[in-house]
Every structure is written in C-alpha cells, then in structure tokens.
C-alpha cells in the first residue's frame, strides 16, 4: 500500500472513537491482509508504538498478517452452521484444495494454496444462520451449502479438479 | 429541509405515504443480507431491467426482511386498492410472470404466500391496503406468522430502509419529536422505567435505571453507545433490525441521548456486517439532512450526533469494558468493575457512558409513542415487551420470530417453527450463544424470560435459539462452544485462559473415547471453578454449555467413557 492510499484512509477517521480499528479494517479490506510495511508506516504517522498496532492486528480475528490468495473462501463456523454440517464442508474444501490444516503465525485459521489462487479461512458467524451452512467467496455468500455444491461454486472462481 | 414543527413532520409523512402507496403498482424486493444471498438481488435486477426496457409505470424498491427466511427470496406487491401480497421463493425466472400479472392488475397466484389487507405499524399508523384476492391466505393465517407479535419488526420488510420518508410515513420520529419538544428528560426516564424494559443484550438490567444512573453522573461530557457487535454465533436479529429499519435504532438513541444529556453517540458494529453499516450510514446522513441529528435538533437547541465504530471480530468485546477499550483503539481485554462505564473515569475516554444493545434502543420509540402502560401490558410480569429470536438450526421453519416475553419454548419451536426439519425429533435447544446452555425438549414448557431461562441453566442472551435434533451429538456441542470460548478468551485471567483450555482437552479425550468416569468429575469441578473465579462474563458463563449438557444429557457422556 503506498503512502497516498494510507493517508486517504487515515483521513477518513477524524474522530478518535473507533479510529485505530477503523484504519486497520480499511487496510485489511483493501489489501486482503495487513502488510508489515503498512503497519510500520501507520505507527510513524499516528505516533503510536508499532507493538500496539501489532497487538491489535493479532488480537482481533478480522485482521490477518499473512497475504492471501486471489480468492478467499471463508467457511462460517457459527452454531447453526456447525449443527448443519460446517465441519464436513470445511474438510471437503481442504481436500479439494489439497491443503493441510494448520494455523498461521498469528494463531488464526488461514491457509493459502501453493499456487496462491485460494485462501481458506473460517469465521465465527456471518449472521446468516437461516441458510446454514454458509460459506463466502470474495464477499459472495452461498447458503444451504452441501459438499456436492462445492465444485460448482469453486469453478466459478477458476478452480479445476 | 429541516424538520422543526409537527406540521413539518406531517408534510414529510404525507410524502412518505405517497411512496408507500404511490397510486400505481409498487414492487418491493426483500434485500437484507439473507435475501441477497439466496438471489434476491438477481430478482431485483431482472425486474428493473424489464420495467426499464418497457418503460412501465411501476415503482420498484428495496426493503429489508420480514423474517420468514426459509421462504426467501421474498417480494411484496401493492396494487392500488388491493391487499399487499407477499410472494415467496421468487427467482429471477419469475420476474417476467410477475410483471405480466401486475400489468393485468393481478399477482402471480402460484407464488403468493399471503395477503395483508391492512398493516398496523404500531406507532400510530395503520396502512389500509384494500380488500381483494380472497383466494390468497391471510397473513395472520400463516402458521409462521400466527403466533408472533410484531413490535420491533413492525416495519421490517415493508418499508424501504434507505428512505427516511417511508420511516416517517409510518409514524417514525414522532416519538423523538414529542420527547424533545414536549417532554422533559425526567418524563422520558420515568416512562422508560415504568415500561419495565430490560437490556436486550442478554443480561436483562433495567434500562431506565441504567439511564438514570448515567443522567445523575455529573460530567461535562457523556457518551451513549449502541452495542451492535452481535458476537453470538447463531444470532442475527440485530443485523436484520439495522438492515431493515435503521431509523428505529437512531430514533431510540436520540430519545435516550436527550434523557441522559449526552451529545455524542456511537454505534459499535461488527465489520462482518457491511450492509448494516452501509444502511446505517445512509440513515444517519438522511437524519442529519432533516435536522434530526446534528446541531439544534428540531430547533430545540439540543444537539446530538452518531458516529460508527467498527469492531474487528472479538467475542469478548461484547463485555462493556472490553468494548470501550476496543473503541479507544486497544485490545479488548476487560477490567474489573467498578469503575462501571456509567461512572466518571470508567466510560469511553473516561467519560460516563451508557451502553445498550441494538434491540434495547429499538424498543424506545414505541414506548414513548404508545406509553409505558401500553408497553408493560405486553409480555409477563417483570419481563415486559416482545423479543426477537433467531430460530435456526435443525428446525423446519427457520427465521426471525418476535413474540411477547414469557412465551414458552414449545410455542416457538413446535408451533411457529413446526418442530424438527425433515420430520426429525427435536432433542434440545441452545439459547444465549456461548454463554448459554442446552435445554432439553422435556423442559419446553419453560417460559422464555430472563429468570426462567436462568433457572434452566441457560440465559436469554441476545436471542439466538439453535435447535438440535436426534442426530445432534450433545457432547460435540459442548466441545464446539468450549473450543469457541477458548479461542475468544482474551487471556487476561487464569481461570478462563487455562481452565477453558483444559476443559477442551478433557472433552477431546472423552470424544476420542479415551476418557474415564473420573474425567467427567474433573470436567464438572473445573467448570464450577471457572464460573466462580473468572474475571468477566465470558469466563463466568463459558462453562454453561458443559454444565447443562452434563445435567441433561449425562447418558451421552457416560456412553463415551470407560468406567
């Protein structure tokens, strides 16, 4: 993220209330993760310690320090999704993408395929419980998901068996 | 234009009514997050395309969600002089037929779910749509709607949430106008106290009392905050309230701010709700334009404005001191109370702060409009008003259900929800999210009120009701919640951080069939210790799913362990 873009994001937050999380959230939304250089630049511009920003970026699950792939698949692990089979959906996705379950350095479930095409992550709850189980790919929600639906959904994003 | 007098409000109301009943066909597509996800936006785009291409004189608008999520996408049609008709399970392929029928003065009969000849918006406005379409069932005959009482969801799915005029048309902002121009802060406080309204975030603290404490605190600045973090997995009523009727929340906050003498309001909302954030921003901008937010509201000299602070996914931030830390730009770690938020030194940036849940604020306008006496008659003694529940999981009719407090679990799950999906037997419900517990089907005559749910070992929480059927493994459910709470523990106090971790290890061992009877004893003892010694509400309530499943479904644990 260049300096100009970061300045524009900072300018959106005049009020101190919600400022730091708001700025970090906007960086996350724009880049798909929070780059280390952006954190350092932000620390300097706002005159806050880098360690404080780092603690925020690792404490809150919305932020990720790891770069993500071209498409981000998020599986909702809310209660309604859990009882309706989210764990099986997640497992099927891991198999389809050929990735091993692991947690990234900041302790969050977020894995990217070797070809950097897909990132698989989990969410606590989208609040779309009526159509459980739910997954999201790049901001598009897919409800009533079954294992059988997954190849069709992923092929929309260039997945090949 | 700035609204100042009652006459100003009435003239906007007239303009709004013209939009709701434009004297020509009006088609409204339910476009809350859930409606969009199942194809509502494709229906909307297709309708817009046809109407545009053929240059038809038909109004097309977006609405929120009426709550019957199972039947989405939902579309409603108003033809002049006829009942409003709700169509269900509409796809883009149905768009041509809808337009064809509407041009003939009809509605597609096969898609029609029910008709609404007149709708009481509760805030002093009943819209008469008209008679006709006798073959389409009446709204109140639809089993899902029959047992419900819509007070908070009175406008949801019917008005356009992105148009303040439609909210004003159905009686919106009349309560705020009356409160600011005709009632003093004391009269408002006393109405809210007498209404018996209790906090809808789950703890059930009397709202009027909290407001009075904040008001009585002497400080040169005060904050009011709306908690819209809705972190409980399985709960989404706040999302729908904000997506479908954002002005209701804003109006409640204005009235509260005036009563407490606060000029600064904040909505702390989870970043996972982008549509709710967008609609709130639109609503706030529209309210400012009418002089309902900002300086000199309604020309009274009172100033108040609302900002939005985004959360970033931390369940513990539902705890008041952690929430404030988060807004201040710190990690959300609770501190012991006192000082409470309402105390000087305890609130946001040290100022006295009142914190209420979305739905608590949403109750305020209707209390002021209809009076505390009217409100207190709804529900049961000590538990007044209605509550919105998200009825989800393995239940046949999933959706948002609004009922008077004191309604039994059985009525909600069996009558409104029609029992288990796919004819399965319902085994239990889980209420209150990770802080709540599992209540077995044999206790479904339990009235849903704060005290009765506590007695059953669970809590009201923010209103999630997740249904479990005969296939659900209750030990797995307990492990699910402990896994959640372990991940969300902020790590500050030992009982929560270490205790939950070891609870999870025990549950993993039991589920791997490597546990013993002794492990079950340890599990119960550890749970009691965490409840008794944790610093904040997260830790104090996190073992509830284990304790309730141990109490009600012990046989499932016993079947897994060696003697």
Image (cartoon, rainbow, N blue to C red):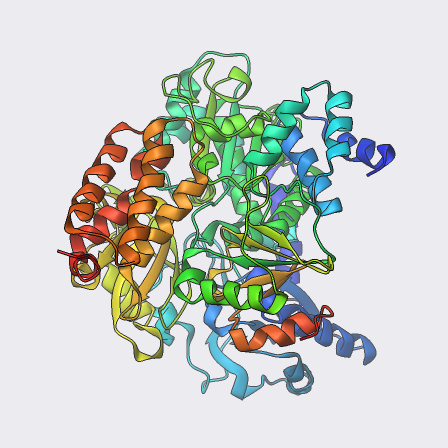
The answer to whether residue A132 shows anywhere in this view is yes
Instruction: Point out residue B386 in the picture as x, y percentages from the top left corner.
Output: 34, 51
Q: Quadrant of the N terminus of chain A?
A: top right
Taking the spot 32% from the left edge, 40% from the top edge, the residue there is: B502
Instruction: Point out residue B328 in the picture as x, y percentages from the top left corner.
Output: 58, 25
Taking the spot 43% from the left edge, 15% from the top edge, the residue there is: B217
Q: Quadrant of the C terminus of chain A?
A: bottom right
Instruction: Point out residue B345 in the picture as x, y percentages from the top left corner.
Output: 47, 13
Taking the spot 75% from the left edge, 27% from the top edge, the residue there is: A40
Along the horizontal axis of the image, is B478 left or right of A31?
left
Q: Which of the two residues, B176 or A123, is positioned nearer the viewer here?
A: A123
| The image quarter in which residue B268 lies | top right
The answer to whether residue B387 shows anywhere in this view is no
Along the horizontal axis of the image, is B366 left or right of B111?
left
Q: Which of the two residues, B63 or B179, is positioned nearer the viewer here?
A: B63
Instruction: Point out residue B214 in the picture as x, y percentages from the top left corner.
Output: 42, 21
Taking the spot 56% from the left edge, 72% from the top edge, the residue there is: B73
**Above or below, comparing residue B554 to residue B329 in the picture:** below
């Amino acid at each position: 993220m260049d300096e100009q873009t970061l300045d524009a994001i900072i300018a959106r937050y005049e009020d101190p209330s919600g400022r730091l999380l708001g700025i970090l959230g906007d960086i996350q939304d724009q880049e798909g993760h929070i780059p280390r250089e952006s954190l350092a630049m932000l620390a300097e511009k706002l005159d806050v310690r880098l360690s404080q920003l780092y603690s925020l970026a690792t404490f809150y699950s919305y932020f990720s320090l790891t770069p993500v792939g071209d498409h981000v698949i998020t599986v909702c692990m809310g209660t309604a999704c859990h009882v309706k089979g989210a764990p099986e959906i997640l497992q099927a996705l891991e198999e389809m993408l050929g990735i091993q379950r692991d947690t990234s350095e900041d302790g969050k479930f977020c894995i990217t395929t070797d070809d950097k095409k897909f990132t698989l992550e989990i969410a606590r709850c989208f609040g779309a419980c009526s159509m459980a189980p739910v997954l999201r790919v790049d901001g598009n929600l897919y409800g009533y998901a079954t294992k059988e639906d997954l190849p069709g959904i992923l092929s929309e994003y260039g997945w090949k068996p | 234009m700035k609204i100042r007098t009652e006459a100003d409000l009435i003239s906007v109301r007239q303009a709004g009514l013209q939009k709701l009943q434009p004297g020509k066909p009006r088609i409204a597509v339910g476009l809350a997050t859930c409606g969009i996800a199942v194809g509502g936006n494709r229906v909307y785009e297709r309708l817009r395309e046809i109407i545009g291409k053929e240059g038809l004189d038909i109004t097309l608008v977006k609405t929120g969600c009426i709550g019957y999520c199972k039947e989405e996408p939902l579309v409603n049609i108003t033809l002049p002089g006829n009942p409003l008709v709700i169509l269900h399970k509409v796809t883009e392929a149905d768009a041509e037929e809808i337009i064809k029928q509407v041009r003939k003065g009809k509605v597609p009969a096969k898609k029609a779910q029910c008709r609404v000849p007149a709708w009481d918006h509760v805030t002093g406005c009943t819209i008469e749509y008209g008679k006709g379409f006798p073959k389409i069932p009446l709204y109140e005959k639809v089993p899902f709607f029959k047992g419900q009482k819509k007070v908070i969801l009175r406008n949801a799915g019917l008005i356009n949430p992105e148009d303040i005029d439609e909210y004003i048309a159905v009686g919106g902002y009349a309560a705020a106008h009356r409160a600011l121009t005709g009632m003093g802060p004391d009269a408002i406080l006393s109405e809210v106290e007498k209404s018996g309204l209790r906090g809808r975030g789950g703890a059930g603290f009397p709202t009027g009392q909290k407001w009075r404490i904040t008001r009585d605190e002497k400080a040169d600045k005060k904050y009011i905050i709306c908690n819209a973090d809705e972190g409980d997995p399985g709960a989404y009523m706040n999302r729908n309230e904000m997506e479908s009727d954002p002005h209701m929340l804003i109006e409640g906050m204005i009235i509260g701010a005036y009563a407490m003498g606060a000029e600064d309001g904040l909505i702390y909302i989870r970043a996972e709700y982008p549509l709710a954030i967008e609609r709130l921003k639109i609503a706030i901008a529209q309210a400012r334009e009418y002089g309902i937010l900002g300086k000199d509201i309604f020309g009274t000299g009172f100033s108040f404005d609302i900002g939005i602070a985004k959360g970033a996914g931390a369940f513990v931030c539902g705890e008041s001191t952690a929430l404030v830390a988060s807004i201040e730009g710190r990690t959300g770690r609770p501190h012991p109370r006192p000082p409470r938020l309402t105390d000087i030194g305890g609130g946001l940036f040290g100022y006295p702060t009142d914190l209420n849940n979305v739905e608590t604020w949403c109750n305020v306008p209707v209390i002021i409009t209809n009076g505390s006496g009217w409100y207190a008659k709804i529900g049961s003694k000590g538990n007044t008003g209605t509550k919105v529940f998200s009825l989800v999981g393995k239940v046949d009719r999933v959706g948002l259900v609004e009922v008077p407090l004191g309604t039994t679990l059985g009525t909600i799950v069996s009558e409104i929800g029609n029992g288990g999906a796919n004819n399965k037997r319902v085994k239990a419900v889980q209420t209150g999210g990770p802080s709540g517990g599992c209540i077995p089907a044999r206790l479904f005559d339990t009235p849903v009120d704060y005290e009765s749910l506590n007695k059953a070992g669970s809590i009201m929480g923010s209103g999630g009701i997740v249904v479990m059927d005969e296939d659900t493994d209750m030990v797995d459910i307990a492990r699910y919640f402990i896994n959640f709470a372990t991940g969300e523990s902020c790590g500050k106090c030992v009982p929560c951080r270490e205790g939950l971790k070891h609870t999870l290890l025990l549950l993993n061992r039991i589920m791997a069939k490597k546990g013993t009877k002794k492990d079950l004893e340890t599990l119960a003892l550890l749970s009691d210790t965490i409840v008794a010694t944790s610093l904040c509400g997260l830790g104090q309530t996190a073992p509830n799913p284990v304790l309730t499943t141990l109490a009600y479904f012990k046989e499932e644990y016993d079947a897994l362990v060696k003697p």
